[in-house]
Amino acid sequence: MFGTYYKRQRAPKYNQKQLEQIPSKCRKLRREITDYETFIIVDDEKYFTFSGDDMLENAGFYASDKENTPPDVRYKCKQKFAPKILVWLALSSKGISRPYIGTTKGPAVTGDVYVEKCLLKLLTFINKHHPDDKYIFWPDLASSHYAQQTTEWLNERKVPFVPKCANPPNVPKARPIEDFLVHIG
């Protein structure tokens, strides 16, 4: 008897530096950067390949005779940096932004795309849902989120954001958008 099958839960893998930083940065974020009147706006992006081979449901194949299965069914060739669809959105307790959906060529969104496509939608979301509110934008630690052009853009438009030095690394439980985007993938 093998017992009951249980699906593993997803959990972040932490390195020692992250484990040391998380408690103090979370405390700072809660006690010094926000208060009970502050709305927190988070954003995130998810990538989907055109082939769909990143979906577990597409990882295998059915065959009555594995040895005589054609090679194009049996083997799946994968490009190193396959073209991807980028889905970006922001959310707060007051709502969800309009998503940005576009293509990307590299492994991650660039600063140009982030500023020109995603942050424009963020600003629209802020103006619609938080025109007179006290809020702070909490991006994750992706390099494009703290690129010089990104921080300059946010500062020019007076969008308060969590400074990189105070941003806790790898805390998906504190960022509900992480769970939200998992379910659309």
Image (tube, rainbow, N blue to C red):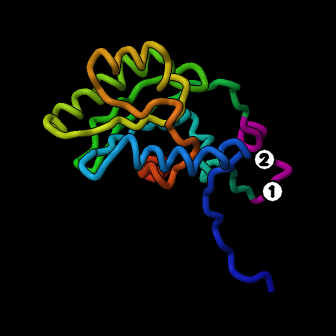
Name which residue lies at 26% across and 19% down: 157
Q: Position of residue 57 (x, y in %)?
A: 60, 53
Give the side of residue 52 with respect to residue 20, left or right: left
Question: Does 70 appear in magenta?
Answer: yes
Q: Position of residue 156 (x, y in %)?
A: 30, 15
Q: Secondary structure at mark 1?
A: loop
Name which residue lies at 22% across and 39% down: 134
Label number found at residue 65: 1
Residue that sits furthest to the right in the current view: 67
Read off the residue under disc 2. Answer: 69
Name which residue lies at 42% across and 18% down: 150
Relative to 168, say whether 63 is above or below: below
Q: CA distance from mark 2 to mark 1?
A: 6 Å
Query: What kind of residue is marked 2?
Result: Thr
Which portion, as a residue range, is magenta? 64-76
Question: Does 93 appear in magenta?
Answer: no
Residue that sits furthest to the left in the current view: 132
Query: What kind of residue is marked 1?
Result: Asp
Instruction: Determine contact: label 2, label 1, CB under 8 Å.
Output: yes
Q: Position of residue 86 (x, y in %)?
A: 46, 30
Relative to 110, say whether 60 is above or below: below
Few, some or many C-alpha atoms within 10 Å of disc 1 (few <14, some 14-19, many ≥20)?
Answer: few
Few, some or many C-alpha atoms within 10 Å of disc 2 (few <14, some 14-19, many ≥20)?
Answer: some
Q: 91 or 78: which is nearer to us?
A: 91
Q: 135 or 141: which is nearer to us?
A: 135
